Amino acid sequence: MKQLKTYFLTLTALASTTTLSAQSQKQLFDFGWKFTHNGTTQLVDLPHDWDILEGPHSGKGATGTGGGWFEAGKGEYRKLFASPKGEVVKLHFEGVYQKSEIFVNGQKVGQHHYGYTPFTVDITKMLKNKGMNEVVVKVDNSQQPNCRWYSGSGIYRHVWLESMPALHIAENGVFVTTPEVSDNQALVQVEVSVANESPSNRNAIITIGGKELTVNLAAGETQTVRTQFTVNNPSLWSTEHPTLNNLSVQLKEKGKILDTQTVKYGIRSFSFDAEKGFILNGKKVLINGACVHHDDGVLGASAFDDAEIRKVRQMKNAGFNLIRTSHNPTTRAFLDACDSIGMLVIDEAFDGWRTQKNPYDYSTVIDSCFRSDIQSMVLRDRNHPSIISWSIGNEVIERKDIRVVYTARQMKAAIHEKDTTRPVTEALCAWDSDWEIYDPHAEVLDVVGYNYMLFKHADDHKRDPKRVIWQTESYPRDAFRNWATVHDFPYVVGDIVWTGLDYLGESGIGRTYYKGEREGESWIKGGQPEWHGAPCGDVDITGWRKPISHYREMLWNENTPLYMAVKEPEGYHGEIKQTMWSVWPTYESWTWKGWEGKPVEVEVYTHQPKVKLYLNDQLIGTKEVNRNTEYKAVFTVPYQKGTLRAEAGEESVTLKTAGEPARLKLTPDRTVMRADGQSLTYIIVEVVDQDGNLVPEAEIPCEATVKGTGKLLAFASANLKDEEPYPSVHSKTWKGRAMLVVRSSQKKGTVNVSIKSKLPIATLSLKTK
């Protein structure tokens, strides 16, 4: 029996602007940059994505249909700063897209190609003893196309200014594992790497969990020390109970504290097995996963912590228990959120390898960069309890070349140099009859990812009964079939749908359209120029959960509330055409003006054995619900205005016909923001009738004004064909909805939001504290 078993305790570094110790300091470096692009200079704060500011140029933008028709290009960031105290000073970039060069006081201090991995540059020798210093970051995203989806352009993740003594805890220098975990005890092993960047030999003491260890370092040496201790009656980390604890590591020399790192950690065990499935803390768990791209919808690539947390929370609320970071390393804040909310993660490094998918993609630098990039991901992320697998690639083009096996082994070996506690996976696929020839490639992997190939599972299991499988991408409309496969066959440990969220780029994937509109998938010649995003997600870019999301949640989670939706009638807007990743347009709506007397299909999702449907308190019918009906009750109802009500067991749900638009309803996700210049509030804008019912067909132009201690960051609907730039003050509601995002300033006070339209002005007040 092939068995992969991991017992793990992990640490998550706290990200803050606070002092790490008496001498070592880390401060957020996001504010007050001068940004130049296309001859125009303006003052900006990070995170910053210049593509999203200008909007898509349908059919014309340099990034093409894959990148959402945005322009990309080149940009330059400049910032003045005083030299901080510290023997060593570094700049840490969480992500710059892409091909960045860093200069300090006119001298080049570093460069980094891959836009999705963090990097650090030492700027100590370039700093002035007196006066101000200038840092310049040049970003070149002009070689297009390079990414198969929307990448954004610029310094789109945080930057940190770090100062430290020459003797310090190395970057990502704390690593903790638990090789033995039981119900009443966990053995904790801690590795701490100490760097001596001074010109002399040094002696120091490291304190870990009350234990003191001595380390002697030669000049320029980095050394790792190890210790262990036990935790009695540990509270285990899981998706239901994501328990995190604190651990402090301290570095002293001659009684003086030089460096301290306080980190969060979680204890948990897991294993993958072809006979038992995926076991987390001794319990079998069926993996219901979502692929999620790195963009944050209306914010583009700008990776605000609040946006990253919201993205994870949306997936958790939709019933998912795993996210695949397709197809690149995500942010620190995203993984912190997965740790604290309780979300499993497949951490993925690359989309493609040596054979190009786009002319300027990672294939142009793979041989010089892949080891440093994949190890950068592993070193930063290996202490997150949420991560249960590393992924080395996705649908690589050279899959029929036997040399691909060597590349896969290289990738896996690079990971194992830094972490052997997690299995390695990769997403394999085939668009022809050649599938079994990939067995040598699959054998390299600990868990084999199948993209749209799950129908091969039974034959593959007969041929290789030890193989552990998860479907790393699947079509949304196959939700029931994929759930049933995972439910019935333990060697198939999970299904991961493409995708959890609508996203920018890959324009038109998942669209439905009407006869007479441009035919075909997104990759046809010329692409889909009217689209700048992919509507294949379970959740749209305003956060609205589509009916397929509620159906999927019901399949995987038996306690999901009763849900009812209505399929758009064929011919209501035209003859409906579907594409490979689409589902039939279905809405929480009983408003079908002009369709009176004509048939409408109503779907009710539940694990209850029977559903009753009423229209205006008259019983329409009763349907039995079970696995044979795919846990759906489907009714055909002649449409008439009024109230539709479904009942199952003790639960009921209603849909009401909406009247004419009467007002705008504003619903914020919070009313108080941190006055830190980084906090966000998402405000849902809905067109409602006089009774407060959403008017589902309302498309009303709106203009937003934000005053006070905050500013408008984005205002948009979920319409991925709308060319209005997301940061514009103008937006038109779509399906009765839009969304406004407000960014706090660094001052305490009040933010006043108002939205004008043909309806009465809608207002809202927020606080910054």
Image (cartoon, grey):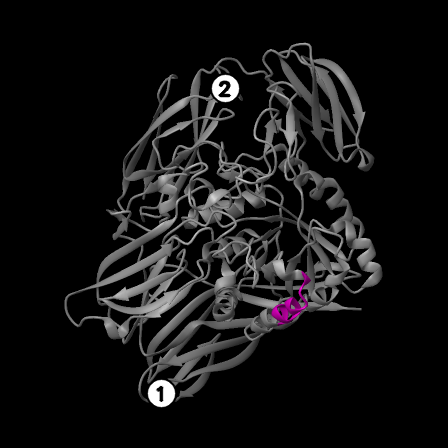
Q: From where the camera sits, is residue 749 visible?
A: yes
Q: Indicate the quadrant containing the N terminus: top left, top right, bottom left or bottom right.
A: bottom right
Question: Residue 256: x and y, percent?
Answer: 32, 80
Q: Residues within 10 Å of mark 2 (few under 14, many from 20)?
A: some
Extreme residue in the left direction? 131
| Residue 692 circle label | 2
**What residue range appears in magenta?**
400-409
Q: Nearer the viewer, residue 620 or 485?
A: 485
Q: Is residue 436 above or below residue 598?
A: below
Distance (Cα) linking label 1 and label 2: 71 Å
Q: Nearer the viewer, residue 229 or 151?
A: 151
Residue 669 left/right relative to 627 = left
Question: Residue 561: x and y, percent?
Answer: 66, 34
Q: Nearer the viewer, residue 260 or 620?
A: 620
Residue type of the residue flagged with mark 2: Gly
Determine the secondary structure under disc 2: loop
Give the residue displayed 24% in from the left and 57% down from the top. 79
Quarter holding residue 402: bottom right
Q: Indicate the quadrant containing the C terminus: top left, top right, bottom left or bottom right.
A: top left
Number of marks in the image? 2
